[in-house]
Image (cartoon, grey):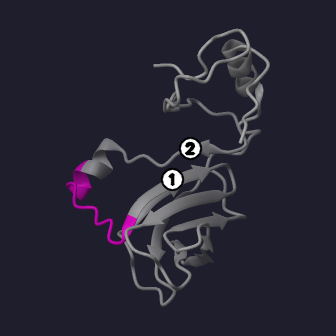
Amino acid sequence: MSFKIFKSSRRKFIQMMASLPPTLNFTGTLSAREAEDRNDSWNEGKLAHFIPIANHENFLIKTSFRESLKRTPLLKINDRFVPGTQSDSQGYFWQFYAEGLKTNFNYELQITSSSRQALCDTWRLKTFPHPDAQVDSYRTLAYTCAGGNENILLEDGTRFFCH
């Protein structure tokens, strides 16, 4: 198996990625007040991980579970249920795609079984403002490098992964 490495510098790659439109962005953090109110008592149940991605009208929630799920789980968004799509062969990984949401709206979410029994506690996630909206402030979190094989080099000899 071979991998084709970018024919440009890391700087050019970063500039190219920064110029792409931000159609989907990571979001979904608890405010200090919400964390204090929950008193670290959020029950993850069978849920091992979830990655929430949002834009102004859609959510994509990627999940993994501590045990294989034989039936399709549901994502409850307020009073609406969205069926999951299995993304592995054994039923540990599922994703949920919710479309047509209200812009700049705070939703309550929960993962449930196919019989609508809670698999974890609820959490809140807000859609972004409409792309044409004027916003007073913007806050983002960027995770820049997960690392990787440090022996992978670009054509100019620069290491592809930083350390």
Q: Residue flagged by tag 2: what amino acid is it?
A: Phe
Q: Secondary structure at mark 2?
A: strand
- Crowd class of label 2 (few under 14; some 14 to 19; many from 20; radius 10 Å): some
Image: 112 above or below 13: below
Quadrant for the C terminus in the image:
top left
Quadrant for the N terminus in the image:
top right
Q: Is residue 41 magenta?
A: yes
Q: Secondary structure at mark 1?
A: strand
Horizontal side, residue 154 vs residue 68: left or right = right
* Residue 45 location (% of width, % of height): 32, 71
Q: Residue flagged by tag 1: what amino acid is it?
A: Ile
* Residue 100 location (% of width, % of height): 72, 64
Horizontal side, residue 21 vs residue 41: left or right = right
Residue at the spot of label 2: 26
Quarter occupied by residue 20: top right
The disc label shown at residue 51, or none? 1
Image: 31 above or below 87: above
Q: Front-most of 6 and 157?
A: 157
Residue at 22% of width from left, 61% of height from top? 41
Closer mark to the observer between disc 1 and disc 2: 1
Residue at 61% of width from left, 24% of height from top? 152
Region in magenta: 36-47
Quarter occupied by residue 132: top right
Q: Front-most of 66 and 59?
A: 66
Q: Front-most of 158 and 32?
A: 158
Quarter occupied by residue 122: bottom left
